[in-house]
Image (tube, grey):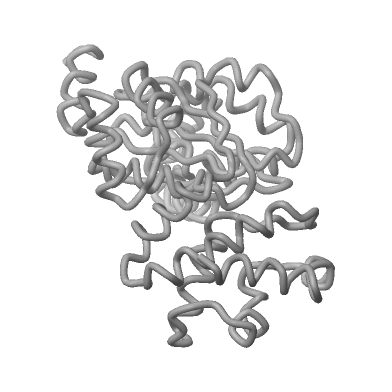
Amino acid sequence: MDRQARGEEGRRQISLPDSIQELEQRLAGQHYVADRGLAVSLFLALRLRRPLFIEGEAGVGKTALATAVAHVLGTDLIRLQCYEGLDVSHAVYEWDYPRQLLELRIMEAARTLDRHTARHELYSDAFLIKRPLLQAIDPKRSRPAVLLIDEIDRADEEFEGYLLELLSEFQITIPELGTIRAAEPPIVILTSNRTREVHDALKRRCLYQWIEYPTIEKELAIVRERIPEASARLAAQVTALVQELRTVELYKVPGVSETLDWVAALMALEDDSLDVAALKHTLGVVLKAKDDIDAIRGQRLDAMLARAMAR
């Protein structure tokens, strides 16, 4: 079977949406509310088989999008969480050295050891430990996966350079084995909280989308979609108060995830609306820095609460 035929087979195994409207409906079925711009970018990424690079503040739904896409397409989600010092052995592959050494000793004991045979046997797929990036392009995969490269801005710039071959050709070169190329490209989503600027060479290989903090109407729709059991009053009040908090200069501005956590926390306390006591006891759910909590205490917080409770 040639590569084109394999590609057609792979496309039959994941059900791509036929239109942007269908994609929006499928995402809504996974309780993900996407605005039109994001839906268009995602639809094009799926159709053109291009990586999608998403930037935005923490908590606006970047990671959740990849999870929703995997469910929408009925395929696996493979996640690489980036961090400072991430290297090839943790992101791509490494050799199982203890098993290789054991195999080498077995060869010596059986007197079957020669240099050519040992290299061929020891540096084979049987001793290769596949990390997320190699798992995603494994030619043996029965269907394309969704590969999430999360918070790429936390990785070192050198690691960005390593990704260029993967994002351009959907292949990885292993010196001992050669080049491993995906039979069918994975759906790649990269996210960044913009703690540093990502290099243009990586961005050029991707489609790009910035996700803003949602409007109050969209955020309320997200809360109702994700936590339908919450009372309409509680959902409206919490959403309004979080929107107010985002107008204040804070060290850590609350995202949508904090809004959802706050609604869930208040429900766990069996509160169906915000009040002074509930706010005092649960403020740490939405604000994660002491300086931020201190900055809004007093009359400022009372005024915000009064406006939110009026909804």
Position above or below: 34 against 174: below
Q: Which of 87 and 42 is in front in this view?
A: 42
For this orientation, the residue located farthest to the front is 310
Q: Where is residue 243 in the image (x, y as percent from the top left)?
A: 61, 55
Q: Is residue 104 visible?
A: no
At 53% from the left and 28% from the top, the residue drawn is 209
Q: Is residue 21 left or right of residue 253?
A: left
Position above or below: 274 against 208: below
At 50% from the left and 17% from the top, the residue drawn is 168
At 74% from the left and 41% from the top, the residue drawn is 195
Q: Which of 235 and 281 is in front in this view?
A: 235
Q: Is residue 103 left or right of residue 88?
A: left
At 46% from the left and 21% from the top, the residue drawn is 179
Q: Where is residue 132 in the image (x, y as percent from the top left)?
A: 47, 43
- Location of residue 87 by image quarter: top right
Q: Can residue 197 be seen in this view?
A: yes
